[in-house]
Amino acid sequence: MKSILLYFNSLKPSGGIERVIVTVANKLCEQYKVTILVKGEPISFYKLDGRVRLESLGNELNFNMNSQLSRVFSAMKSVYKNSKSLKLYLKQNNFDYYYLAHPLNVLEFHFSKGVTTTNTVITEHGASTAYNLIYRKVKSWLYPKAKVYVVPTTKDTEYYKNLGFPAQYLPHFKSKLKYEKASLSEKIALNIGRFTDVKQQIALLRLWNSLVNVKQIKDWKLFLVGIGELENQFEEYIERNNLQNYVFLKPPKESVEEYYKQASLFLLTSKSEGFGMVLLEAISFGLPCVSYDCPSGPRDIIKNNENGYLVPPNDEVIFEQMVVNLLNNRELLEKMGNESLTISNNWNDEKLLEQWNIILN
């Protein structure tokens, strides 16, 4: 049985990237010996299959999210420290393939062993527009050296192919959740994502302020599920605009199904998405979706005017109009929810696994 090492920063957070890594590992371990190597504590927020080994370099990664300059220096020190530790680890442990999921990880791996066309698989979790200049330089230098660069969205795949990268379109596996159709009986709109600038949940708070305090639509609630550096700002906005009975900040949890099954509508206001795992999960529970048509991701999951709406990025006026359309039209809400479920049923994990087997053999 061939072996594969997935090298990543950490599995402790409850984010979409971490869920994707765990889902990939749990799928591949059915046919491969899978090891995940992280930098800090060998702990996973999401449940790993018992066949997956989780190991650590013992180098906890801590960035000051309030200072970009501090993050740059921390990243430089981290690359040096992790490269040394990784080089020692790889001398002691051999694998047939190496799966890398971030430019810094790729850089550390290259300094430790070297990116090659024979055994290095690089994958993508961020949109092409989401990377700073340094990360883009790393990608243009090292990614063309890999065996394959797995990209989960159609638009970014074409973008990277045009740059000469060995890009291959391969969307993510569906998260392993207990899927069932939401009843759409509760008047709850849902967003799941880290409370950061890139997710732009502040736009949803402005939307709900308008619905409640201007349009007097007071029978719907908004659930924002996540944690992050903007949490205090969100709490202050809710209190300042008397939205305590209409907007609720909810903690992440592994049994995220409970949030989806409660909801009747999913909303996404991200500046960019590497894929949009939460959208795939949402449609798999039969939820209609309204999302900004950010550069990649949502358009591969939402069919405009069929199972939801794609709104021009940052157009809060049109976004509100589309949401109000669904809040006021139960028949349309259910129709789009049924279409979401139909689209999700066409998501074939077995075919995706076949493509992975082609890559790894």
Image (cartoon, helix red, strand yellow):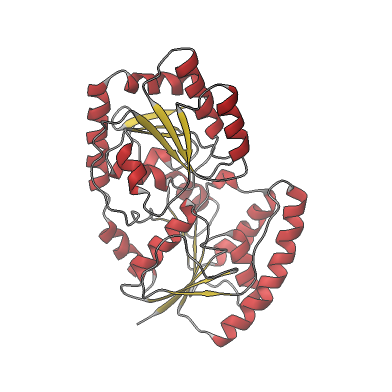
Answer left or right for 30 relative to 149: left
The x and y percentages for residue 268 are: 45, 35
Answer left or right for 359 relative to 92: left
The x and y percentages for residue 29 are: 35, 72
Query: Toward which corner of the image does residue 230 lie, by quadrant?
Result: top right
Counting labels gives 0
Above or below for 207 versus 267: above
What's the residue at 59%, 81% (across, down)?
89
What's the residue at 48%, 46% (across, down)?
251
Above or below for 194 versus 99: above
Above or below for 101 versus 109: above
Pick whichever, 102 or 359, lies toward us.
Answer: 102
What's the residue at 34%, 82% (across, down)?
1
The x and y percentages for residue 121 are: 48, 67
Does any portion of residue 313 appear in the rendered image?
no
Pick whichever, 241 or 152, lies toward us.
Answer: 241
Q: Residue furthest bottom?
A: 92
Does any portion of residue 209 appear in the rendered image?
yes
Answer left or right for 20 relative to 103: left
The x and y percentages for residue 52 are: 40, 74
Above or below for 223 versus 89: above
**Quarter containing the C terminus:** bottom left
Pick whichever, 265 or 289, lies toward us.
Answer: 265
